Amino acid sequence: MSENHLSARGLDTLLGEWRGGASAYRALSDRIRLLTLDGRIPTDSRLPAERDLSERLGVSRTTVTAAYRELRDAGYLRSVRGSGSIVRLPGAGAPSPTPETEGILDFSKATMPALPGLADAAAHAAAELPRHLDDSGFDPVGIPELRAAIADRYTARGLPTAPEQIMVTLGAQHAIALLARVLVGRGDRALIESPTYPHAAEALRAAGARLAAVNVSAGGPGDDPGTRGWDEAALLQTLQRSSPVVGYLMPDFHNPTGQSMPAEQRERVASAAADACTTLIIDETIAELDIDRAGEFLPFAACTDMRSAPRVVSVGSVGKTVWGGMRIGWIRAEPALISKLVAARCTNDLGTPILEQLIVTRLLADMPAILAGRRELLRVGRDHLERRLAETFPDWQVPHVDGGITAWVNLGRPVSSQLTLAARSHGLLVPAGPRFGLDGAFERFLRLPFSHSAPDTDRAVDALEAAWGSLLRHPFTDTGYLAEVV
């Protein structure tokens, strides 16, 4: 029996304005399917009883029954005696030679193609592996040469760091989840941005945190620059009044908005966090993907004073710069916290693979040249995406970003989930805006990466154009769904 019971009220909140031009049962089925594919309804969740949901939505029970039946037939629900309707993914539990996304262009992941020369770096690292084979191979903290290389990289960027302040992890997500488990107790407050990186929110919630969200705005062409970025007043007020145990921030090329926090603001935020005894988890996985940002931006921890520095923990990885399949990340923190993290880690995993650490050690020595190539790739991709969107969707607001990997596009209408579902039928996988919110917000937004090749970007924009056209041909103005224009 599933432990995650989704109430009728909770599902109603997630559904938002689900009624469309299709029949009611099909519109309801489509929205639940999208929420499942998008991860907003976790698999193994128990959906509300048909009668409860029909009463909550104000539709006939026949409508809900038909929607659930269609989801069962498509493999998205299974019936369990005594447990009701349980959410699943088609083919879950049995490997499939033809995954559901075969032939679909995947724009759901903001990543770049593997670094040229990565295979050569792996071959050189393999030649160095024999000198590590006399040990057990279980490495919970990181090999000394990689910790030293990461520390040297921080120092070169303006933040003096010793190897003892570094712990190597299985990517940035592993680092965030581990920090959440060690720093957060059940019921503790945690500050987080909205929108945000969804897996960070999931990690904090899994640790038992109660999330306090602070807005980050991308703005749009012609907007006052002062309205973009972090709502500083709300951020400082949340720190002062709620005293959250931790705060998760991405101050450089924020995912998904692409915004960067000014240096002066970083100092004020760090100071307020120190006053509130809040540990800031600073996600810097995209921090060095600068295209044409004006000014000098040091690592966040370099903007703090001696009093604030111990409460700033930095997280990094090579997943965005080298390749998503290179699962190496790290935590920079005070040695005492590093020791706690190492002790806590063994309950979930026994360490980071040695060979991958050797590969990254070799690559970090060439990081300036690697970043130069990546920045040029992103410059071309950003400019091409902005140009295509301006030509195809002149009414959409596409804020210009100075770096990072993504554009946070304002559609002008709260149809992100419907557009995402329509785009899938045209061969494009892209996450709906609410995937980056905490409670179903951001239906007017769509996150689009500009790290793909020009042909793939063209194909994606063409798919969005076809999907957008299908929405316009079947308008939802009878419910006011497309009537709101911002």
Image (cartoon, rainbow, N blue to C red):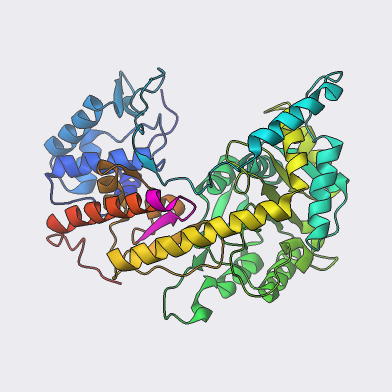
* Towards the viewer: 268 or 388: 388
> Magenta span covers which residues?
445-456
* Quadrant containing the C terminus in the rendered view: bottom left
Left or right: 20 in relation to 414: left
Task: Check the image and report above or below for 170 versus 321.
Answer: above
The image quarter in which residue 277 lies: bottom right
Return the residue nearer the eye: 3 or 346: 346
* Residue 351 is at least partly visible in this image: no
Is 455 colored magenta in this rendering?
A: yes
In this orientation, does residue 261 appear?
yes
Vertical relation: 256 (above or below) 179: below
Image x and y of residue 51, in percent: 20, 36
Horizontal and vertical percent position of residue 78: 30, 23
Q: Position of residue 1 (x, y in %)?
A: 41, 22
Please count the marks in the image. Answer: 0
Left or right: 432, with 112 as reference point: left
Please give the name of the residue rendered at 54% of the width and 56% of the height, measured from the top-left corner.
Answer: 377
